[in-house]
Image (cartoon, rainbow, N blue to C red):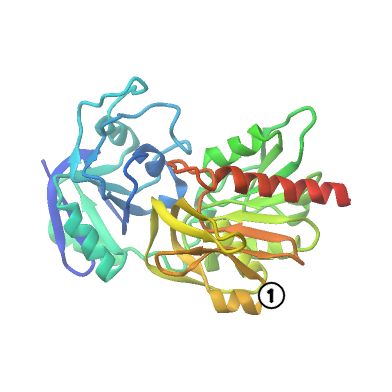
Amino acid sequence: MGGILLLEDGRSFVGDAFGASTTRVGEAVFNTAMTGYQEVLTDPSYAEQVVTMTAPHVGNTGVNPEDPESERVWAAGFVVRRLTRGPSSWRSTGGLHQYLVQNGVPGIQGVDTRALVRHLRDRGAMRCVVSTDGTPTDELQRRLEAWPGMVGRALAAEVTCKKAYVFADPPQPVARFAVLDGGTKRNILRLLADAGCYVRVHPLTDPPEALAKDVDAVLVTNGPGDPAALPGAVTTLQALVGKLPLVGICLGCQLLALTIGAKTYKLKFGHRGANQPVRDERTGRVEITSQNHGFAVDRDSLLAAGARVSHLHLNDGSVSGFEHLEKRVFAVQYHPEACPGPHDGQPVLVQQFVDMARAARGAS
């Protein structure tokens, strides 16, 4: 059966259907990673987004139970140039087609993804509908127009955990972290646990006193949607500024910027992929990073709030990290947990998070 991707500007792309037979709406975005499609699909930051992969062959390594970054596929749809139906990997326990069927997610293959990505790069990320079940075009258009888009959407509140839980509790932790979950990926929790940390995860709705109880620092995670649509989380973090070190990644970077009085804005087509160049402004070191976000921190308002830019995205000059030394706030826009990789920034950043928490413990 055929499949169709219809964009809000009227352009459409037709291909062969795979995955679930259904129709889904979302934001059309693209990811430039060559590998790691299972981590991409299970990243909560892709909630209500239809992801196009720029790599020409997808599905080569199949899927397995170790690589998911959450308990389910969050992407609304998946578009590829060519699907590999016969995966070849000693780790594979199944194919991508069956995986999307099981998770109720439609896919389209045989699409000219180069043309699609160039279109999104020029026009920007936009609303779309992907259909693999033969839904009439007029109904697809109606559903596309009814979808509200990403601006003003508090999607992180929909993907956060339902109640607090302890992920790691070593006998003698080197530091103790509360993690504010906006859509966390499992590997950031694993990295903190591997570093010998106590790790307790909280939903976005938990009050500041719950986060601050018996910990040395708070980490605010990645997640989907518009950070400005989460005033409750910002209020919670404002109650903790100056009391504990606050560190963040991705959405957490944006929320912490809002917390200290800066502003955020929506990027034209976002940064999504495993080849994003970032320069550490403190050392001059350039790292190739993994990123996935559609919003960014406004530089001028960040400087006006008394913070300094610690990391700069070298493709477009946007803020990829900041620190406010007086308030003990530090955050990066990229993913140190890097699933998929590369791992350039992983050891340095995780150690910096741990060092900030340990320093707070020593000062208390």
Between residue 114 and residue 233, name the one nearer to us.
114
Relative height, residue 173 to residue 277 (above, below)? above
Q: Secondary structure at mark 1?
A: loop
Which residue is drawn at the image coordinates 56% and 52% (left, top)? 182
Between residue 274 and residue 11, name the one nearer to us.
274
Q: Which residue is mark 1?
A: 306
Which residue is drawn at the image coordinates 64% and 70% (left, top)? 308
Local crowd size for mark 1, using a 10 Å CA cut-off: few (<14), some (14–19), many (≥20): some
Which residue is drawn at the image coordinates 49% and 42% (left, top)? 343
Q: Residue furthest top?
A: 90
**Rendered-image quadrant of the N terminus:** top left
Residue 47 visible (yes or no): no
Relative height, residue 104 to residue 357 (above, below)? above
**Residue 337 x/y as whole percent:** 53, 43
**Residue 243 x/y as whole percent:** 81, 59
Left of 243 or right of it: where is 52?
left
The mark total stands at: 1
Residue 15 visible (yes or no): yes
**Residue 297 x/y as whole percent:** 53, 69
* Quarter of image, res 267: bottom left
* Quarter of image, res 133: top left
Residue type highlighted by circle 1: Gly
Q: Residue furthest front?
A: 284
Between residue 359 and residue 120, name the one nearer to us.
359
Which residue is drawn at the image coordinates 61% and 49% (left, top)? 349
**Residue 148 x/y as whole percent:** 37, 66
